[in-house]
Image (spheres, rainbow, N blue to C red):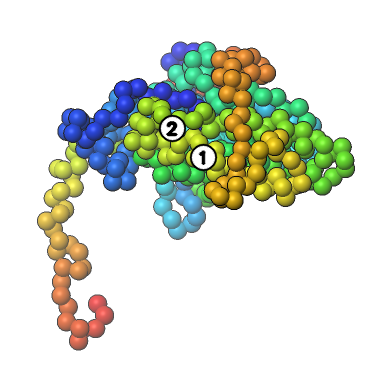
Amino acid sequence: MYAQMIKSTGQGVKSLDEMEPEERAFQERINAGGKIEPKDWMPEGYRKNLIRQIGQHAHSEIVGQLPEGNWITRAPTLERKAILLAKVQDEAGHGLYLYCAAETLGVTRDELTRDLLSGKMKYSSIFNYPTLTWADMGAVGWLVDGAAIMNQVPLQRTSYGPYARAMVRICKEESFHQRQGFDIMMKMANGTEAQRKMAQDALNRFWGPALMMFGPSDADSVHSAQSMAWKIKMNSNDELRQKFVDLTAPQAEYLGLTIPDETCKLNPDTGHYDFAQPDWDEFFDVLRGNGPCNTDRLEARNKAWDDGAWVREGLMAHAAKKRAAKLAAE
Amino acid sequence: MNAKTEWPLWEIFIRGQHGLSHRHVGSLHAADAEMAIKNARDVYTRRNEGVSIWAVEASNIAASSPEEKGSLYEPANDKVYRHPTFYDIPDEVGTM
């Protein structure tokens, strides 16, 4: 998902009996559906895990602006341009809601930014793929935002209050993102033969990477078991991926496009769509930094940070000067 | 990237519509109050969510701590007479 391969303490889930009273009270509160707020006691592992997860999620929103920002100046109409601009601005907003949630855990925005820029913290693998044609704007909204929604809707019930509240805001806005993407796909799929081919080509390229967004199967992962006990992960990766395919396959059919997987068919016995696993070797390779756009994305973020340094410093100096003048006048 | 150049944290409160109180919506970073309000407009009211914005520098907020829960709120538990349901009013008196 937007946060992939998050590692927990790695020690497996403790039973209530094995916990000290403080931790037991904490876990019981979560089990009862209660929320944890910033100043409450929490196990160090919970705090660290959440910083990693929310931070990675925030970084994904910010880096995720790049593949779509790529098409703002070349959108086919003024209306499409205004819509795309609004969508990309929303992604910046989502990043900010999430950074603000992460900061309540005792990490600063600059620390998180530094870890993104140095490559220490990751962002979702999906944003390391290029957006080659206008149809990719459709595929990204429809598939990438669609996959993100699968994960984000249940996270509105996550145990950490600030994270849950950020998710509520994000989910309200995310539906616009997916619909504007599908709207582009409908236009292209029903357009000229060349446009239909572009739409099909975009689906071909984004299908596998979209399935990878959920991460590899975590049925046996101790990290996932711990995250689920803490309710900072609500469903298994396979569960969400299946849900995504079940919803998306009929939509592709409606568009008259073909999912690039011959095995993707409704299974009458299970009531779910069968589908082939994406190329997990490719996934791990992209995570290691070898995707088509990893270098570009990090370079773009580093350049934006470095080029903006004089503005950040200048505004701080200006604020300090104004404060001093105000004090002197009093 | 040093601490001196990191913009301070502001907590943002938005009045959703006239007649409602300002409500905390989140935080953001800004160099000064004017910029905090401008940023709050972009981050928290892109869809007409507000008619008024308060920005308060986070370091100026005093907050109770979870450990004080007992001493602060428990005394209210034995003052049930503060609630209207504590009093039995006979039916013949009518609505009260």
Which quadrant would residue A260 be assigned to in this image?
top right
Residue visible at 45% across and 58% down? B19
Which corner quadrant holds the C terminus of chain A?
top left
Q: Is residue A218 visible?
A: yes
Give the quadrant of residue A264: top right
Which type of secondary structure does the marked residue at label 2 adopt? loop
Labels 1 and 2 in the same subunit? yes
The residue indicated by pointer 1 is A240
Pick out the residue farthest to the front: A269
Q: On screen, A18 above or below A314? A: below
- The amino acid type found where label 1 is placed reads Leu
Quick check: A286 left or right of A80?
A: left
> Residue lying furthest left in this view?
B78
Q: Position of residue A66 (x, y in %)?
A: 65, 26
Say above or below: A266 vs A14.
below
What residue is pinned by disc 2? A219
Q: What's the chain of the residue with tag 1?
A: A
Q: Chain of mark 2?
A: A
Q: Position of residue A167 (x, y in %)?
A: 47, 41
In the displayed structure, does residue B84 sit left or right of residue A286?
Answer: left
- Give the mark count: 2
Q: Residues within 10 Å of mark 1 (few under 14, many from 20)?
A: many
Q: Nearer the viewer, mark 1 or mark 2?
A: 2
x, y percentage for residue B65? 24, 36
Q: CA distance from mark 1 to mark 2?
A: 12 Å
